[in-house]
Structure formats: C-alpha cells, structure tokens
Amino acid sequence: MSKLNFCLRACALFVLWATTTMTLPAQTFKSLNSFDNTDAALPWATLVQASDGNFYGTTQNGGNTACSLGCGTIFRITPNGKLTTFKFDGTNGSDPIAGLVQAANGDFYGVTTEGGASDLGTVFKFTPKGGIITLYSFAANTGYSPLGGLVLASDGNFYGTASSGGPPAGQCDPGCGTIFKITSKGQYTTIHNFNGIPDGGAPLATMVQAPDGKLYGTASALGNAGSYGTVFTITPEGKYTVVHQFNNTDGAYPFGGLILGTDGNFYGQTDLGGASQYGAYGTVYKMTPSGKVTTLHSFEQTDGDNPISNLVQGTDGNFYGTASYGGKYPNFGTVFKITPNGKFTTLHNFDSTDGSYLYAGLIQATNGIFYGATYAGGSSTACPYGCGTVFSLSVGLGPFVETLPNSGKVGAAVRILGTDLTGATSVTFNGTAAEFKVISKSEIETTVPSGATTGTVDVKTAKNTLKSNVVFRVTK
C-alpha cells in the first residue's frame, strides 16, 4: 500500500454520522466534469488558473496504464468544462498529489510522489506543447515523496518539501522529510532536514513566502514532546525556526499549509484537534507572524471534518475552504466560508453524485467564481467510489485581475490575468501608470514602472476598472 493510500484510510477512520446543515440559497453550484479513469482519476490538488484563462490540475491516478491504477495526469479544463489530459508514464513521474505553479514565462512546474529514476518522485516542468520534462528524481538521502507543491519565490527559485527521507532521525527511519530549493533548470539543493523532535516532521503542504522573504510552512507531525505538529519559517539560505507547536486543543496535524491574509496574518487549517463538543474534527486558525495562534472555528462534523487543504481569501475579505468529510451527508464533505473574526457558514454539502472527499482547496478565478475538485464521487463507475469531479461555486462576487508574480522590482516582467481584458486602456501600479500589451482577453504583459510603490494593480477597461485581488509588492 502506498503511503498516500495509508494516509487516506487513516483519515477516513475519523468519519462519523451526524445531522444536517442548511445550504444558503444565494449561491450557484455547477458540476463541470466527472472523471472516468480513462481520461484521469482522483484529483487531490487545488487548481491553478493559467494565463490562457483555463484551469490546470493533477490527478493521482488514471491515464497511462504503465502503472497499475494509471500513472496520473495533468489536466486542463475550460471554465465551461471542456477537458484535456496529459499523462505521466512512470519514468517522468507518477501519482502527482500536489498542484502546479505557473512561472512568469508561462511554463508550469510541479512534483510527483512516485516514479522517476528511483520511483521516489520527481520535480518536473510542463507545457501543453512540450509535454512533461523531468528536472529531478528524488532519492532517499535527499528526501522523497513530496506531497506539497512548489512555491516560486521572489529570488526566481522554487522551494518545496519532501514528506519523507533525508538523514535518519530518532523518530524517523529513514528520515523525517526535507525542505529543498530547485532552479528552473533542475539544480537541486537540500536546505533543511527535519529531525522530528524538536522541529517536526512529515511536511505535507505547500509553503508560502511572506513580505519579509521568509517561507512559512507546516509539519504535520512531531515537534516537542506533546506536540501535534508545527508551523515553521525558513529563509532561502536555510535558517529554520519553529514558530508554533500545536497542542491538540488549538488543532492537531496540520496537513494543509498557510496563506497570507490581507491583514498580514496567516490563516490555515488542522486535520484534527480543536474544541468540538462531539470530537476532534479539526480547526481553522489565525496565526500572527510571530506565531501566536487563535482558533477561529472548531469543526463539529455536521459542518465538515478533517480539513486538509489550504484556505483562499476571497475578494470580499472572507476565507473560503473545504472539509474532506462531514456535513449533511457525513462521508462526503463541504465547502464553507469563514470571516476573519470566525463567523462560519456552510455553503455546500456534497452528496457523492456531485463529488465527495474534498482533499483539494478552492481557487477564486478572475471572473469572481470559485472552482475546486473532489477526490471521488461523480457519475463514473470506473472507480469504486467515483473518480472525482471538477465544480464551480458562485457566491455573487465580481471580476478582478491577478498578477503573476505578485511581487517584483522596477522593470520586472509581470503578467496580468483576467477574464475580459481585450479593451484595456490603462494599467497602473498603486496609481503609477505602466506600459502594457494586451496578449489576449485573459492576459496582459507589462513591467513594473519606475516610481511604483506597493499597492493594488488596476486595469481600466471600457466597462469598468478591475483591481488586483492582492497588493503587488514592489521589492528593491
């Protein structure tokens, strides 16, 4: 049994039966696709909206039959649900769990948990025209089986975590996992080896870079005696610091990572723990940059349980997320909204026909609508519990623009992503005008103008002015 399947079965043990939760009538839910295993199966990761306006993701199985359950795929899906798949073949990786990140040049980068030269996973580059190219094959002594995705840092390099491997530690054999850096050309460097106690182990989530240049991440297990996982920071040079140790009451086993809120605090979820009156079903929490954690919500199972994905902050300032299980139909999961102050609302209860087991988080696309994927469920009978779905959920939020990347020096190239940019008449960085070129209805090319300061990026069109969903940080 693979390590991932073991994790899934272990998580499933915590699913219990419960009562119903009301769904708000104001939103519009749509099922866009049900995977059928031939094309792809079992999407685990959060989607990414690319510069072509489409969504890209990965599936753990399906596709090439060189692997017993299929080696997994990268898929592209349009906002209307048209699907195209690109298949792993084992030699270039298999079983991709993490999602993709798109670089400013349009190329995608990601990791697989298995396959490659040692069957321990790979780092790869992908383009729809060029296919999947292996940049690095993991080995036991440098870490292996990465479950979290890559983050493209401000220095132009990618950073990620391997869930296992590295030098043997007292609590982990052969190792507790690693943090690594890799260039776009595939030059790989281990910058930290987890040791279990006291710095944690089994990192499973994508890290996030803060304005101070540090990377923030979570380790799902270990830490000091009595700890239930950690939050850490690490500099690009490898200086590692534990900033919080979970104690079960404030959460336990943070499978998901952190996001940086517009208020400068970090927000995340834990798979278990909390103060639920029915049991330890997980939490949503806020953390200051110094590591002070406040529990915003303890799941009750009726509103969801075992959340393992990242949150996303919507353009209304609220946070949106998924719970793997629980809700009205306790096996199948929920989508929810939570305010920065902790007011929690269940938005959708899955019933298996529209999907089940939400291991992936949500993204808010530039049309204002949220998109996500379910690991199982749907209309196909090719997988025991369904092969998974892709869905959209509108809650009435309007369009915006997104910058790729969201920080850079004066003169740095920036792509602006949107939904209807063809008639753009101006682009400004916190009020400073920039020269630009409209590439398509979903993409503008520009550079950070001289005199620009940190703030929102605005694109003026014939219809309205579209603001960026986050501030663009001008660096030196």
Image (cartoon, rainbow, N blue to C red):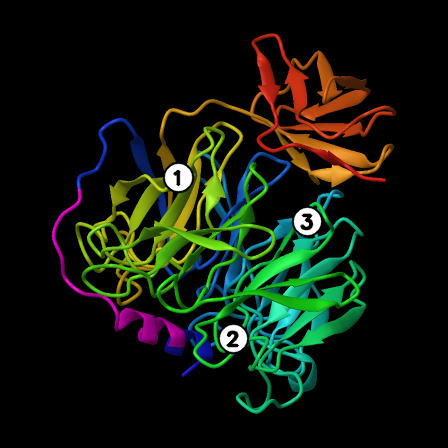
Q: On the rendered image, what quadrant is the C terminus found in?
A: top right
Q: Residues within 10 Å of mark 1 (few under 14, many from 20)?
A: few
Tag 3 secondary structure? loop
In the image, 134 versus 199, the foreground residue is 199
Q: Is residue 153 within the magenta segment?
A: no
Which amino acid is tagged 1?
Answer: Asn
Looking at the image, tell me whether mark 2 or mark 1 is earlier in sequence order.
Answer: 2
Residue depicted at x 55% and y 76% = 201
Tag 2 secondary structure? loop
Asked whether the residues under the numbered discs 3 and 2 touch, taking CB atoms below 8 Å apart as contact, a structural biologist would say: no
Looking at the image, tell me whether mark 3 or mark 2 is earlier in sequence order.
Answer: 2
> Which residue occupies the extreme left position in the image?
19
Residue 175 in percent (x, y) is at 60, 85
Reading the image, the residue beneath label 2 is 66
Q: Residues within 10 Å of mark 3 (few under 14, many from 20)?
A: few
Magenta part of the protein: which range? 7-21
User: Where 344 sits versus 11, above or below?
Assistant: above
Residue depicted at x 59% and y 75% = 199
Left or right of 311 in this view: 325? left
Residue depicted at x 26% and y 63% = 385
Reading the image, the residue beneath label 1 is 341
Asked whether the residues under the numbered discs 2 and 1 touch, taking CB atoms below 8 Å apart as contact, a structural biologist would say: no
Reading the image, the residue beneath label 3 is 129
Asked whether the residues under the numbered discs 3 and 1 touch, taking CB atoms below 8 Å apart as contact, a structural biologist would say: no
Which amino acid is tagged 2?
Answer: Ala
Tag 1 secondary structure? loop
Q: On the rendered image, what quadrant is the N terminus found in?
A: bottom left
Q: Can residue 132 be seen at all in this image of the molecule? A: no
Q: Is residue 18 within the magenta segment?
A: yes
